[in-house]
Image (cartoon, helix red, strand yellow):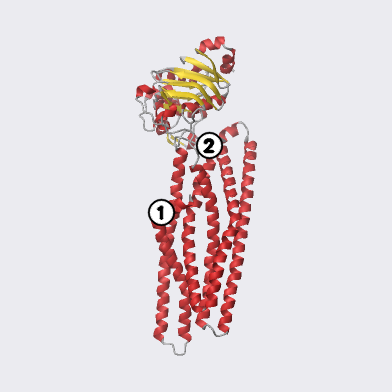
Amino acid sequence: MLRSTVLSRRGLLGTATVLLCLHQFGEALVPVVIGRVIDRAVSPDGRASDLLLWIGLLAALFVTLSNSYRYGARKIEAVAEWGAHDLRMRLTERVLDARGGAEEGRLPGALASIATSDAQRVGAVSTAVALAAAQITAMIVAAVALLVVSLPLGLLVLIGAPLMVWLTAVLGRPLESRSEAEQEEAAAASGVAADLVAGLRVLKGIGAEAAAVERYRIPSRRALTATVRAARARGAYEGAILLMTGVFLALVAALGGKLALDGKISIGDLTAAIGLAQFLLGPLQVFAWVGSEFAAGRASAGRVAEVLSSPELVGEGTAKGGPASFAGISLRNIASGCLKDLDLSAGPGEMVGVVPRDPADAVALLRVLGREIDPESGQARLGGVPLSDLHPDEVRARVLVAAHNAELFGGPMLESITGSAELTERVLVASAADEVIASLPDGRATVLTERGGNLSGGQRQRVALARALNLDAPVLVLHDPTTAVDSVTEARIAGGLRSVREGRTTVLVTTSPALLSVTDRVVLLVDGRTVTEGRHADLLRENETYRTTVLS
């Protein structure tokens, strides 16, 4: 993951690395040139022209290194941002993949944290790579310059610098594991927070604020503990690196001073040696930062890779078929989760009610009908074609599963209903959304806030139902579309559904007597199995389980 991200913009990365290396090359030469200037200035037989030449060379060196850094920093920042952006796009595509799987076991907030914080950390590794190359260049140039000034000084740097780099990598290993734990706990806390915020209105309605706070407190404390541990590890790491570099540079400066006192190097050479020793502090400190960035980047890359490599819940499918092949839907001997040996069918133009004794059966059924998951055994068919042979996108183009908790998007209300389809007035009437529009001060011009927060629960349900009906899908599956509306409105919606879905296959998963009364037949599910079916009125009269489920 790190390698592919770093190399995704290899041309731009190469240019940025060359420019940053050129900057560090110039920085390393500055003490050497200053030493030459000093030697020319204090030399009894020095000429003014030579002094001016070296001063001019020093000025040219500063112009070169400053411009190299200016443009190199811009380019490497672009590489990092593009790398993070590409990862975010890949993560988004994976999460939105019709075959599913990426969201399993992960809260939306956790996925958002991976797509933002983790992607940014992985992208930043490109910056660390370029800067690492630049620091290596600086250390090589400094070592060569020191070898020219004095062989002992050069050997000390050549032996000591690689040892410092190795120690940096060793000391960074605990930081990597703690950084990974920090990101894991932060993502978990973010996921719980997003989950609670999404249900804030419900939590307030049932007075569960204290329980919600307590639920968030535990992952929040874990995230805080992990963050503090990671910060302590980072501080200890950087402190240890600073101590080692300080000792190393003190040795270089001490040896250079002794050589100058012994007359083995000139005053200018001593100045260059001390300047190079001080200069080397920068690259070694940057190596400490590079090590921490690699540690954090590896941890984040692992989390990103887990999402991208999540196994799909369903296959692609390759079968094709014309509209006539998709006229009805049927399930035979389905076993999936809590569903066991389930039989269900809805023929062309038929409106079938499904009454689940257990709400979990309804959720599992909707996942099978929308091909969010393939059943463990049995077969689901759309017309005469197995759902498993069709691409999920093709299934969902013909089978619309309108879940109970369908969300509304912010923006103009009519756009939320219509999408790309043309709005028909009969849809507004059938869903009773016309009453919603009439009750709003701005009517059809109403702009919805995020998730339709400026509508009541019943108004949101009717707008969501209008959106589902307006798509006019060949097969429509509705899950409890009227739980938040009054009985009069519910009866009106029931009649409207029957009218607007004439000639289309419709499955109503509900316990609402008003909706079930307009269906052609009803199927009762108990413990994940089909136990009986018939007309609503007949089942009310003859089946005690059905009667208590629907009327309780």
Q: Quadrant of the C terminus?
A: top right
Res. 316 image quadrant: top left
Most foreground residue, 123 or 262: 262
Most foreground residue, 325 or 40: 325
- Numbered badge on residue 51: none
Residue occupying the point 34% across, 25% down? 322
Neighbourhood count class around disc 1 (C-alpha, 10 Å): few under 14, some 14–19, many 20 upward: some
Report the side of 97 relative to 356 (left or right): left
Neighbourhood count class around disc 2 (C-alpha, 10 Å): few under 14, some 14–19, many 20 upward: few
- Numbered badge on residue 9: 1
Question: Is residue 438 at least partly visible in the picture?
Answer: no
Q: Are marks 1 and 2 in contact (CB under 8 Å)?
A: no
Residue 222 vertical position relative to residue 477 in the rendered view, above or below: below
Q: What amino acid does circle 1 point to? A: Arg
Most foreground residue, 485 or 157: 157
Residue labelled with disc 2: 104
Most foreground residue, 176 or 376: 376
Q: Secondary structure at mark 2?
A: loop
- Residue 485: % across, % down: 51, 24
Q: What amino acid does circle 2 point to? A: Glu
Question: Is residue 136 at least partly visible in the picture?
Answer: yes
- Residue 332: % across, % down: 48, 20
Q: Secondary structure at mark 1?
A: loop
Q: CA distance from mark 1 to mark 2?
A: 32 Å
Res. 400 image quadrant: top left
